[in-house]
Amino acid sequence: MKVFRYTIGILVKIIEVLCKRLLGKKHVSNWNLQTELIWATTRYTLLTSNKFGLTWLKSLSKNYKPKAKFGNQLVVKKIQNEGRSYLKITPKTEGKIENSIIYFHGGGYVTGSPIVIIEFISKLALSTNSEVLAPFYPTAPEEPYPKAHVFSTKFVESILNEHKDNKFHLGGDSAGGALVLSVFRNMTPANKSRIKGCFLISPWVEPTSKTGTIQTNKEKDVADGDYLIECYNTYVGKKEIQHEYPVGFNSTNLVKLPKTLIAIGTHEMLLDQVLRLNENLKALNTETTLIKYDEMFHTFWNHSSKIQEADKLIEDIAIWKKGKLHTM
């Protein structure tokens, strides 16, 4: 019954957008039809989970299995060994690929997987000419805090120990961006020195925040504060946050990173906390590059080929990785 009600609701949202467009009304004047439809259906889906629950949303996410594209240009493998499971996406090229990106997906520590973002990480591999390793880290409620954090640290350390000659970057979006911060602070000094850079896409670094753009952008973004708090509570519950595995980050528990790219949409609820993160990292003498994508909402990067800013973000990461983006 929930799936039926949800499907009807999605159809209604699509019809509403189309009717408003016929009347010359746009939600945002610069958005094309695809962008507005993606925003409206994503927002409806996430807000519906406030009524139906995150377990429902998680089951919905598991049923979403986009097919890998660019098959003639990439080799995509699912690797399972030694308690690890991850996607390995490698560009087809002559010679050995020595550039690797370890990428953590978002989803509030509850939903999502490398499969859901396969188009994004495939394009990322091609644009940067890098091998992308995207782990299936444990998620709540089945695997509560600090399971995702412990797994992610062990995963990165083991991959680096196995690939002594590769150059590595760490990347992630939303909760995955926060995992990057946690992982890096827990790595051995020797392995920290091997990370050439980090890129954080809309990192969720103040998970219990209830003020600022959490409020002022809640009508512009794809979720609301209730959704964010529910994700946090589902993962952390009533557990005490362990010092070595922080979920939130501020000036007291951040560590200096290698050169770091930070990306955020101006319509996101996380906007002000990401701007604070940038300032806090700069105060630690981290070389940061901050890029704001006008009128973009959370998860926009997952829709390359449909939202031009998503393709622009992938291009910007590739240019930054080559050292050709200016620091801000």
Image (tube, rainbow, N blue to C red):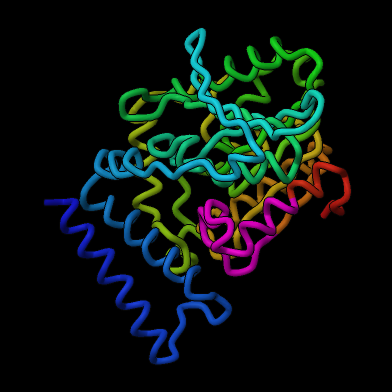
Q: Is residue 47 left or right of residue 169?
A: left
Front-lying residue, 55 or 301? 301
Residue 101, image quadrant: top right
Please tell me which residue lies in front, 247 or 141: 141
Q: Residue furthest top?
A: 82
**Residue 59 seen anywhere in this rendered image of the structure:** yes
Q: Is residue 325 left or right of residue 223?
A: right
Residue 66 on image: x %, y %? 44, 45
Counting from the top left corner in percent of width and height, residue 311 is at 65, 57
Residue at x 47%, y 68% (from the top left corner): 220
**Residue 319's x, y, as percent?**
81, 49
Magenta span contains residue 175: no
Q: Pick whichever, 9 or 51, lies toward us.
A: 9
The magenta stretch is 292-316
Image label count: 0
As drawn, 202 above or below 68: below
Whether residue 253 appears in this view of the structure is no
Q: Residue at x 51, y 32 (%)?
A: 247
Does residue 249 lie above or below 5 as drawn?
A: above
Q: Quadrant of residue 8 in the image?
A: bottom left
